[in-house]
Amino acid sequence: MIAYNQPLYRPPAEANSIIIQATLGCSFNKCTFCTMYESKEFVVRPLEEVFLDIDKMATSYGDANKMFLADGDALACDTEHLIKILEYAYNKFPKLRRVSIYASAFNLHDKSLDELKLLKEKGLNLIYYGIESGSYEVLKRIQKPISNQKMCDGLNKAYEAGMKISVTVILGVAGKKYSKLHIEETAKILNQIKITYLSTLQLMLEQHTKQRFIKNFDGEFELLSTKEMLKEQKYFLELLNPMNKVIFRSNHASNSLALAGTLPKDKCRLVDEVSYIIDNYL
Ligand code: SF4
């Protein structure tokens, strides 16, 4: 077993994957709702250290077929560096068929199409990407200011490179004032891109970050109630018309209602499920 640099996070779908820390922390580390890596300095780990961890894991779990490269946005590594990790990992794990990674909106945008194609060729098959909101107004206020155009460019490049893309959206992140804008702009961007998986989370703020988070909303931030969160969920689903088949989940620990389906096929059923809970239980 390897000694992970804590805290360590991975997407729920990577529960059974080998986790290798290619980087520590998050290269951006400024989003006001996120405390995951606040205690860590961003570091790209030297290849020798990463290889040593891969060796150790291969000794005990050599039959593993999935690997996740942590921490917060390991796509920030140079492409050459990532390729060396991928080649080493596929060599040490003969049954490996999927390697996934967290990407930030910024470093996905910075990779060229050729770099992403090369990474896909070397076995980087799945990218986890937090859109959070499609509204630039909201993104500025949560200190993740990236334009819709840049988000779409990055995600379209990953799609064109043949990668699967898993996107998360945060319900409630815009508070009451910007709720409608948040949902409408987020659905708009998702209707323009091709992704594989989509999840919604609900905003959860840790006590010590609340002040900083609310300050950027000019002190006007009002948290959504559970009913309002589910109304956002419903409105969001109603507006979604994805260009391709998208597997949708809201099964994170933060979600007050677990939903699962495939869009657009299950859209009406999902909307009905949310409506039923709003009308009968809230
Ligand atoms: S880019 Fe992701 S991991 Fe980094 S601070 Fe923002 S939400 Fe957190």
Image (cartoon, grey):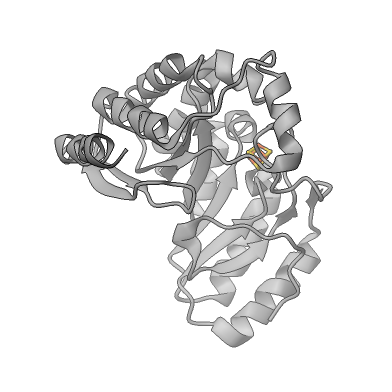
Residue 246 showing in the rendered view: yes
Ligand 1 visible in quadrant:
top right
**In the rendered image, which quarter is residue 181 located in?**
top left
> Which of the image's four quarters has the C terminus?
top left
Name the residue: 66% across, 58% down.
84
Measured along the vertical axis of the image, is residue 131 above or below residue 185? Answer: below
Q: Nearer the viewer, residue 255 or 97?
A: 255
**Which residue is the extreme one toward the right?**
41
**Which residue is the extreme one toward the bottom?**
60
Name the residue: 26% across, 38% down.
274
Q: Position of residue 207 (x, y in %)?
A: 71, 41
**In the rendered image, which quarter is residue 239 located in?**
top left
Q: Nearer the viewer, residue 213 or 117?
A: 213
Name the residue: 79% across, 57% down.
45
Give the left or right position of residue 121, taking residue 276 as reference. right
Q: Position of residue 220 (x, y in %)?
A: 63, 15
